[in-house]
Image (tube, coloured by chain):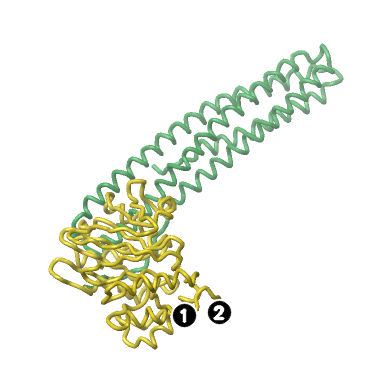
Chain colours: A green, B yellow
Amino acid sequence: MNAPERNLHLKAPASGELARIVRVNEEIKAIVSTAFRINLMALNAIFLAKRAGNAALGFGVLSNELRRFAQDLTRHMSSLRDMTSGSVGSVTGVVQHQRTSAILAQAIRLSGDGVPGVREARRRGAARLAEQQSRLRSLDLRLRSAVEETQQLVELGGVLARSAKIEAAYGGSFSPALMQVSTDFAEVIAQIKRSLEILGKERLIKD
Amino acid sequence: MKQAHCIYQQDDHRWLAIARDATKPGYIIDTNEYVVLSGEEALLCDPGGIEIFPSVFSALSAECDPTRLAGIFASHQDPDIISSLALWLEFKPDLKCYISWLWQSFLPHFGGQESTFVPIPDSGMPIRLGALELQAIPAHYLHSSGNFHLYDPKAKILFSGDVGAALLPADASNLYVEDFSRHVRHAEAFHKRWMGSDRAKRDWCERVSRLEIDMMVPQHGAIYQGADVQRFINWFAALEVGVLKG
């Protein structure tokens, strides 16, 4: 009996999912490194405020708050990173499964639908794929909600940076130095906001 | 075009050769797959790689009911032998895969779970298939360090994996060896390079010389039958193996 031969030139249908995880991870890494920078900047700001004495008491308090903010942000990002590294397994499962299903579907096309067992194989495959995709969707939801929580935290960081700028104006002879530090705070927090916006738009799985 | 050829039939006991694929992409080594059928059960020998799964599945389905597949016999662990495992399991999740114990924990990288694998001890073992009792015959180091061939004493067929393999020109479509002397020219370099142990080779030649073999069916190239089987064993026994050139 003849069986028509065709070469397999299958697209990798879910390769985009892995690329998305890589992008999400890269953004998370960027935010973690920025959070580390804020932590150092806040530490320097605390020393600077101490040197400025009474004129920079308010600035010192805000610098302490910014340091706490940087630590909270690092914790948030680390839980986000755990989530995405867990999702690599799920995405790989989906990618593998889609490839397997595509090859099996091609085999069935060549053999005809009348071959015993193919309907059951298709049903089993579809059920398993649906299960993996649903797991990925729920992970995606959790990731989005975690990003939203982090965005709220960063809003607070933005308020602290603005307040630091106001306090810097009362820093007497230290005012230009304190102003420079508070401007740096505002810039890095704006940078984090941009990264979080990108993260908020990324989806681990297409709808 | 992959085709399934019936190379042996006695009542419901059959051997199918899914062999010689002239239309496959040139960058993939050509492989032969064999199906042993007995009663309601079938065993697939060296099912091949992922890339050729659709054509093997289709050729097999054209000749027999694929739900009858009870197991897969993998002579060794190479990708052209068994990388399609996950796809066969996708079709039939309860398939058993017979493989040397040595590769039992390596093969799950291709697919399957613990319950999929039936480890074959170094000394070999009988494999039940319907009314048949097949024999896993040791062929270690020919070429893999955990390597088995499959012998069917009733059909007198030896599935010899890579032993007897010949890398034939793309236009050679003969299923059986027609001219032994010309054929082995295509087998010589392969055996010299891939078969790494002279001692293992001599052991194997001695072992299979004691078997009654009407057909020796390799994973690449044409099938040896009749007197060509012993000719091959003699030729192999005399061949210097484990050499890069010469």
Q: Residue at x 56, y 28 (%)?
A: A76
The chain identifier of the residue carrying mark 2 reads B
Relative to B160, does residue B110 appear above or below in the rendering? above
Quarter of the image with the C terminus of chain A is top left
Cα gap from disc 1 to disc 2, whole angstroms: 13 Å
Q: Quadrant of residue B28?
A: bottom left
Q: Residue at x 21, y 69 (%)?
A: B154
Mark 2, secondary structure of its residue: loop
Residue placed most toward the observer, B171 or A186: B171
Quarter of the image with the N terminus of chain A is bottom left
Left or right? Give the position of A198 relative to A127. right
Relative to A1, does residue A193 appear above or below in the rendering? above
Q: Amino acid at mark 2?
A: Lys
Mark 1, secondary structure of its residue: loop
Which residue corresponds to mark 2? B245
Q: Residue at x 39, y 74 (%)?
A: B205
Relative to B173, does residue A107 appear above or below in the rendering? above
- Where in the figure is residue B157, as x and y percent of width and height? 27, 72
Number of the label disc, if any, that sits on residue A194: none
The chain identifier of the residue carrying mark 1 reads B
Q: Quadrant of residue B55?
A: bottom left
Residue placed most toward the observer, A59 or A64: A64
Extreme-left residue of the structure: B11
Q: Residues within 10 Å of mark 1 (few under 14, many from 20)?
A: some
Q: Amino acid at mark 1?
A: Leu
Residue placed most toward the observer, B84 or A21: B84
Q: Quadrant of residue B3?
A: bottom left
Circle nearer the N terminus (1, 2): 1
Number of the label disc, if any, that sits on residue B239: 1
Residue placed most toward the observer, A179 or B191: B191
